[in-house]
Image (cartoon, coloured by chain):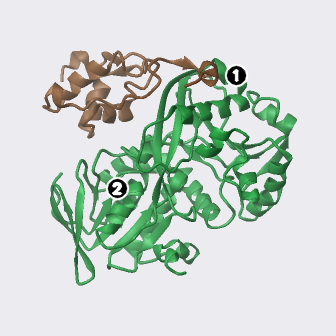
Chain colours: A brown, B green
Amino acid sequence: MDEMNKDLIICRCEEVTEGEIKKAIRSGARTITGIKRRTRAGMGLCQGRTCQNLVRKLLAKETNQKLGDLKPPTVRPPVRAIKLGIFEKSEE
Amino acid sequence: MSVRSAEVVVIGGGVIGTAITYYLARQGVDVALVERGDIASGTSSACDGFVMLQTKDPGLKLKMALESAQIFQNLSDELEWDIGYRKDGGMVIIETKQQLEAVLPRIEEQRKYGLKIELLDSQQTKQRQPCLGNHLIASTYSPMDAQVHPIKLTLGFAQAAEKHGAKLCLFTEVKNIRIRKNQINAVITDNGQIKTEVVVNAAGVMAPQVGKMVNLEIPIIPRRGQIVVTEQVPPLLKGILTSATYLAAKKVGKSSQSTNEDAKKLGVGLIVEQTEDGNLILGSTREFVGYNKRTSYQGIHAVIKGVTKVIPVLREVNVIRTFAGLRPATPDGLPILGEASHPKGFIIAAGHEGDGIALAPITGKLIGDLITKGEFPNRFAQLNLQRFSKN
């Protein structure tokens, strides 16, 4: 592990560092969702839209998997944050 | 991890399976946990973190919940792991006279079990929880209600179990269970077999499939709960919140008292909590739709409508995520705990529906004691599977 990158922020919304993500992988995370559950990376306001690719690359490298073999996490609505008041008045 | 034999094999890496594994490992039992995915990859990561006592019916459920609550108090220290436990009290809001009439005798009954609970009038309710709307007529409040972080709790049990020597076999699927002369003999997985004489079925919504492997019918069906997560906001809600709708509904024998047709069909019962990080967790539907874990527009819409009515200021807050989890529901709403009548060595700990998080510590302790000491307290004896075949 590059000690230099240890404190590099990967998930900006939740301020999760590269060191924390690598630690999650060492403790057993084998999927992007597994990393999310252990570190909160991807759980913030942007829902991983910024950091997901970085997390994927780290996971692939650390676990010797091919990038293409990593399953993407489940996509959850809404696509963009929306106010409850607007959703409440909406129709399908 | 490849394990060839163990004294006990626990099937299921959710909050129940990891709790049991922890209690066994702590007693020095050679235990292996087998989970087809990751730790907390099913129901235990798709739920709220309620450790609520006052919603439990007086009787077995409340007894279990009270004993569990006791364990929760020092669990972070015991596991040497932050489980996000906060005891900030809980409130059940009352919106109609009918609900109030249903609540009054119930809280009297609950007090007899040792639950601290008080009735607040509308003014006291607003004082305690200023974010609430003005239509409430009363509420009940219990300082004993608490919340935890469900994923942290499950991971906490798992890592503590591992520290005590338990083997965690993750991404390993149980294919069959071998029986010899009506005695458990081995668990067959897609990564080889594990010789063992004791199996604990803690597979939650998958418990019936594991039961079939030993010719047992386990009456658990998945019940979907859809949940909404908001952006992080400054502290808005103190403790946890739910509504008395379900109580009045029980009394009149209908599935719901809601006037909203959608909410009725979806079984919406209000739950609201704010996490340590500031997100609000809003729920939830209670639907029987098989193993479908997707969210639906109607479900999310009904949840949001119910919540904004009670906490109007939430209309200004953003939804960032929605998800659904499957609760393992039993016909009588109580979990199935204890040793099955056959085969020898087959123990069931599943069917907690929406109470798995709150009841995990006591479940782990009970099953741990059953295996290490051969003791199962009389007061919980009727939770066994055999209760469904009596009539």
Q: Say what secondary structure mark 2 lies in.
A: loop
Is residue B260 toward the left or the right of residue A81 in the image? right
Residue B121: percent from left, percent from top: 86, 41
Screen quadrant of the C terminus of chain B? bottom right
Residue wearing tag 1 = B313
B72 above or below A59? below
Element at badge 1?
Answer: helix
Which tag, 1 or 2, sits closer to the chain's start? 2
Circle 2 residues within 10 Å: few <14, some 14–19, many ≥20: many
Q: Which residue is mark 2?
A: B12
Name the residue: 40% across, 70% down: B217
- The quadrant in which residue B102 appears is bottom right
Rendered location of residue B51, percent (x, y): 58, 48
Q: Name the chain under label 1.
A: B
Q: Is residue B373 visible?
A: yes
Marks 1 and 2, Cα distance to the nearest angstrom? 40 Å
Give whichever of B251, B72 is nearer the camera.
B251
Question: Which amino acid lies under the numbered mark 1 shown in the image of this protein?
Answer: Val
